[in-house]
Amino acid sequence: MSETGRTEAFSDGVLAIAITLLVLDLRVPVRDALEGSLADALGHEWPSYAAYVTSFLLIGIIWVNHHAVFELLGAIDRVALFLNLLLLMTVAAIPFATSLFAEYLTAGGSAARTAALVYSGLFLAMSLAFTLLYRYVAGRPALLAAGVDPVALRRSVVRFSTVGLVLYALTMVIAVFSAQATLAAHFVIALYYCFRQTGSRPRAAS
Amino acid sequence: MSETGRTEAFSDGVLAIAITLLVLDLRVPVRDALEGSLADALGHEWPSYAAYVTSFLLIGIIWVNHHAVFELLGAIDRVALFLNLLLLMTVAAIPFATSLFAEYLTAGGSAARTAALVYSGLFLAMSLAFTLLYRYVAGRPALLAAGVDPVALRRSVVRFSTVGLVLYALTMVIAVFSAQATLAAHFVIALYYCFRQTGSRPRAAS
Amino acid sequence: MSETGRTEAFSDGVLAIAITLLVLDLRVPVRDALEGSLADALGHEWPSYAAYVTSFLLIGIIWVNHHAVFELLGAIDRVALFLNLLLLMTVAAIPFATSLFAEYLTAGGSAARTAALVYSGLFLAMSLAFTLLYRYVAGRPALLAAGVDPVALRRSVVRFSTVGLVLYALTMVIAVFSAQATLAAHFVIALYYCFRQTGSRPRAAS
Amino acid sequence: MSETGRTEAFSDGVLAIAITLLVLDLRVPVRDALEGSLADALGHEWPSYAAYVTSFLLIGIIWVNHHAVFELLGAIDRVALFLNLLLLMTVAAIPFATSLFAEYLTAGGSAARTAALVYSGLFLAMSLAFTLLYRYVAGRPALLAAGVDPVALRRSVVRFSTVGLVLYALTMVIAVFSAQATLAAHFVIALYYCFRQTGSRPRAAS
């Protein structure tokens, strides 16, 4: 397998594991400790389900975007490898931040604010690592695959990076005021990314 | 790797992780808290083993069917990517629903009913996501691999979707009456899918 | 990817996850509950380390043998797919049996015996599933890769199956008498498989 | 897939899972047991975050180096397969040692020393397994890919092995005196490996 192919496969592995580990945040109410009905106990866990869906979509989107970046690469160097590792380090921590956010979403006060800030802050850090990786490879024509236009690429990097950084920075502002609005904002960001490019032509398999 | 190839590899990763995480639902009785013999304590956990086997087979079948759908694809677009993500989101939650079902299978009353409804409901949602994905790609000749007959495909989609949706909807009806019959019904569905196509010719490797 | 290639990749995924999940059986002594030195507390956990090493080697060997079987295949059918799924179902349960065995290895009496029987029984079941899969494909020339000699293969299946089944059945007999001797026997089996074929020629990459 | 290709893919799977399981060491403070602010409780967990970052980088580096070794191979034999399995066995245990180290980093006294020695000792064992694998394949021209110069390779093995073994042995000495200095030393080793070869030319894809 090529250098870029193996890096992509390793990254895919980490992304697939991180997205699937989100299920560990969905807790089964202990039978002997159950008060009231199970339906009520499960309903009480709604923040976990909302956080699961939101984080699942967001990691899915990271996977799609990560793939789009690696499609541009014809080679990879040490710096890009470690910027990619930095990105994976933030993604692998998402199940933790998701669990924390779900636990304190309805706690109110400073605890809910702290959890919301950690969740938003992690996505901001992820977006920053992604921007660093993307900018780095876009500025090194030797790393690009044949036929990739460096000028158009650089313009796309600026647009992509700015949107991500601004959106996640905005959620940090929202986090100061309301944890639940913060989760809703992340969900809206997920939907935005899901539907943004649906008009694009199908890419050929090869 | 091609777009469809990488999506398939990522999906395979999520399916392989979800199927293996089922083992976390098998609990080891704590030694210091053991009353009576270990054999009795393990025997008491039979719902966990029954649920493990059933969910393992069902996720295995999802993997086989998922592969069959992707074999038809020559390309993929954003909508298909996110319908696939929706499908994976339901599959990744199966270890949670399995654990919940095992915990309350013998609880009787409304708790057992709730757990059975959640389990059946998740498989119905999975079946629905699968149907949406399958119908979507079947209706877009641009996404199909060379040599796939769109008309025959559309007929196959209708049959496949109807069977899955009806079977899982039926388990929801059963869930209203008996949790244990619901698990048995899922097991029968798994066997049905396992043996249904065993008469088919071996597919050539290439 | 070919049908056999994708089945192999999915199986590899399950095997890699099962082998890595063994680490979850290694428990960190809780700091606030620590009595005496940490070194003593860790030393007290020696059954976990012994079981980890043994199960890790055994799953590693299953992976090597699984690969050897799939190298013979040129195609796969539904029956082989589901025999393979059955095999994976037993392998994915190994972290549970390992954890159970480690917890009760030094418990003595019937609890230790039960845990040893479960551990040995699971490996016997794995060996049985492997035998079923191997015999099935060996008896179907249509599934074999070009150049594979069915007669020599059938002889190899008999030898391979008999050795595995007899060895694991023997550990069940040992389990009746001593849990610790059972673990030692499994470790010896692992070493036997590791060194058995080391004289063989390197297989060329291609 | 070739013999070396499949071994590499399996190893990548184990490495990707081990690196992602590190997230399970990041614990969410239980809401009902929270005393003081959540920010304080999270801040109190700083050893977990420091250990997460350090172990994540170190496993990432193991992955890069593992890949570099496998790039030299044209074939693989049983001995190399099991030396590789030994290496994976040490890597898969890193999440356990990381969790142990984080739990006792600030405990002081002999407990902190024990945890630091276990952490350093595991990395030393990993380095030893890596050295054994690397030396073994370097001494067998039949296993090397076409164009690999055995003499230059042998010189590189000596340098690589000595650096790794000496560095990790040094951390064991540091562990006798200070757990926190031990973690810092591991972090410095990670940075050393990250930046050491950044001047190297990009390797071509394909």
Image (cartoon, coloured by chain):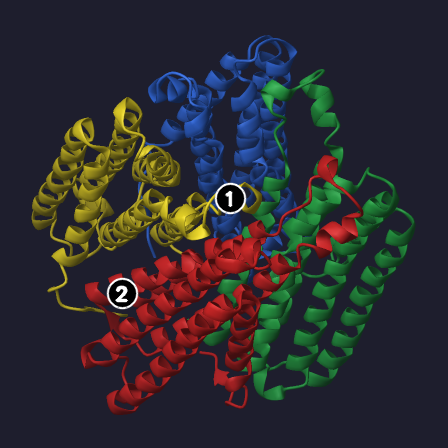
Chain colours: A blue, B yellow, C red, D green
**Mark 1 surroundings: few (<14), some (14-19) or many (≥20) residues within 10 A:** few
Q: Would you call the spot at circle 2 few (<14 residues within 10 Å), some (14-19), or many (20 or more)?
A: some
Taking B40 as reference, is D141 left or right? right
Residue pointed to by mark 2:
C83
> Can you see residue A196?
yes
**Residue at point 28%, 71% (across, down):** C133
Residue A167: tell me if it is visible.
no
Which image quadrant: the C terminus of chain B?
bottom left
The amino acid type of the residue labelled 1 equals Leu
Taking the image as shown, residue C125 lies to the left or right of residue B150, namely right
Place of residue A147 in the rendered image (x, y in percent of width and height, measured from the top left): 47, 52
Q: Is residue A175 left or right of residue A59?
A: right
Q: Residue B132: x and y, percent?
A: 22, 35
Q: Position of residue C174 (x, y in %)?
A: 48, 73
Image coordinates of residue B142 in percent, x first then y, are: 22, 45
Task: In this rendered view, identify the residue nearer to me: C60 or B91.
Answer: C60
Q: As displayed, is residue C27 above or below residue C131? A: above
Q: Amino acid at mark 2?
A: Leu
Let me know if marks 2 and 1 both belong to one chain: no
Residue B34: assigned label: 1
Q: Is residue B32 above or below residue C106?
A: above
Quadrant position of residue D71: bottom right
Q: Secondary structure at mark 2?
A: helix
